[in-house]
Amino acid sequence: MRHTISILVENKFGVLTRVAGMFSGRGFNIDSLNVGPTLDPSASRMTIVVRGDDAVLEQVTKQLEKLVEVIDVQDFRDEQYVDRELVLLRVAATSETRSEVMQICDIFRAKIIDVQPAKLAIEITGTEAKIRKFLSLMETFGISDLTRTGKVALARAN
């Protein structure tokens, strides 16, 4: 089972190393990790996706809360948050396939960000499910390069 954890941390040197070290030192595998600034310049938000059952999640949360630089830990449950991921990819696009690639991009609200004679660079944002479906369709054209941001999440307002 995959869990999404949002961690508010002090924006200090070495915090990312300590958080990642806590995971690796206890044998937890991180599926994705995203770190960025918040409205408060003294704090950063980490969004971590980890695999494991509820017991693993509980242990991870307790260990994170023990770290001095950690301000808050949220375990996002279904329907309690919204999430997105950004993917940039390059696909082969011949004169015969270019219009089909563009049509799929329109359906998925993806943006073509660079056009070369035999390749297109595409940007897509969305949920993991949306991105998985889009990438499976693009595989038929030949994906030559791909980079992903990892998931970012935001709690739903009450």
Image (cartoon, rainbow, N blue to C red):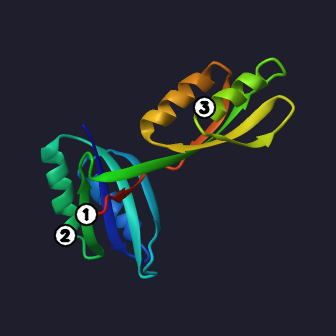
Residue designated by label 1: 158
Across and down, in percent, residue 59 comes to: 15, 54
Give the amino acid type for the residue marked by disc 2 in the picture: Lys
Left or right of 14 in this view: 120: right
Please state if 28 lies on the left or on the right of 152 as rendered.
left
- Inter-mark Cα distance, 3 to 1: 32 Å
**Mark whose residue sits in front, 1 or 2:** 1
Does 126 sit above or below residue 72?
Answer: above
| Spot occupied by residue 105 in the image (x, y as percentages of width and height) | 65, 33
Mark 1, other Cα within 10 Å: few <14 / some 14–19 / many ≥20:
few
Viewer-nearest of labels 3 and 2?
3
**Does residue 5 lie above or below 146 as drawn?**
below
Amino acid type, mark 1: Asn
Where residue 126 sits in the image (x, y, percent)?
49, 43
Task: Determine the residue positioned at 38% across, 70% down.
Answer: 15
Precedes in sequence: disc 3 or disc 1: 3
The answer for how far apart the CA atoms under marks 3 and 2 are is 46 Å
Question: What amino acid type should be assigned to the residue bearing mark 3?
Answer: Ile
Nearer to me, 35 or 99: 99
Judge whether residue 152 can be spotted in this image: yes
Label 2 belongs to which residue?
66
Using the numbered discs, state the Cα–Cα distance from disc 1 to disc 2 in whole angstroms.
28 Å
Marks 1 and 2 in Cβ contact (< 8 Å): no
Dot 3: element: helix
Q: Residues within 10 Å of mark 2 (few under 14, many from 20)?
A: few
Q: Residue at x 77, y 25 (%)?
A: 98
SS category of the residue bearing label 1:
loop
Q: How dense is the environment of label 3, judged by Cα within 10 Å: few (below 14), some, or many (20 and up)?
A: few
Classify mark 2: helix, strand or loop.
helix
Q: Which residue is mark 3?
A: 107
Question: Along the horizontal axis of the image, is 141 left or right of 129?
Answer: right
Q: How many marks?
A: 3
